[in-house]
Image: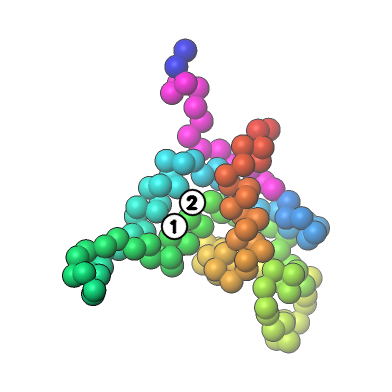
Amino acid sequence: MSLKNLTVVTKTAKVGFPGLPGFEVEIAAISRELSRKLKDQSEVTKIDPKHRIPVKELDEDTFIQKFTEAAVKGWKGLKYKYLPELMLVDLSGVSDLEEEVDFSVEEAVWLVKHSQVFDSWLNEQVFSLETFRN
C-alpha cells in the first residue's frame, strides 16, 4: 500500500477557542502543499528599483485572504463581549454584548488581520496533526 493512497488531503475539525466559552471555530487542515500553493498565488512581481530586475514579493493582504478562506470554514459562539480579548474594539454601539458575530469569510479575514491572538492560534491549529486526529 502506497502512502499516496493513505494520505488525507483535507480534513476539518471544530476547535474551541481557549478562554472564550462556546466560541468554536471549524477549521481545515493546511498541508505543506496547500500552504506553498497559497503563497505562490499571493506573490506579485515588482521591479527592484536599485537593481532594475524583477523580484517576487508576497502580497500579505492577498495571502491572508486566501489562507483564511482555506483555513476557516465557520464559527459559532463568537460573542461581542469576547472581542476585547481578541483585538481593540469600541463596543459602545452594540446593544447586546451576548449577541454573536455572524460568520462570513469577510469577518474571518478581518479577525485574522486585526487579532494577533486569533491569527497565532489559527496558525497553530491548522498545521497541527493533533487537531485533526479524531
Which residue shows up at 43% across the image and 65% down it? 60
- Residue 10: percent from left, percent from top: 51, 38
Return the mark for residue 70: 2
Say if the magenta span includes residue 31.
Answer: no
Q: Is 33 on the left or on the right of 98, as rendered?
A: left
Position of the C terminus, as image quadrant, is top right
Q: Which residues are magenta?
A: 3-15
Residue 2's place in the image compared with 54, above or below, is above
As helix, strand or loop, the secondary structure at mark 2 comes to helix
Looking at the image, the residue that sits furthest to the bottom is 92
Residue 107 visible in image: no
Q: Is 28 on the left or on the right of 52, as rendered?
A: right
Return the mark for residue 83: none
Residue 67's place in the image compared with 99, above or below, is above
As helix, strand or loop, the secondary structure at mark 1 comes to helix
Residue 13 visible in image: yes
Instruction: Please name the amino acid that badge 2 sits on.
Output: Ala
Which residue shows up at 38% across the image and 62% down it? 58
Instruction: Classify 10 Å Cα crowding around label 2: few (below 14), some (14-19), many (20 and above).
Output: some
For the residues bearing labels 2 and 1, Cβ distance under 8 angstroms: yes
Which residue shows up at 19% across the image and 65% down it? 53
Instruction: Please name the amino acid that badge 1 sits on.
Output: Lys
Which residue shows up at 48% across the image and 55% down it? 67
What residue is disc 1 on? 66
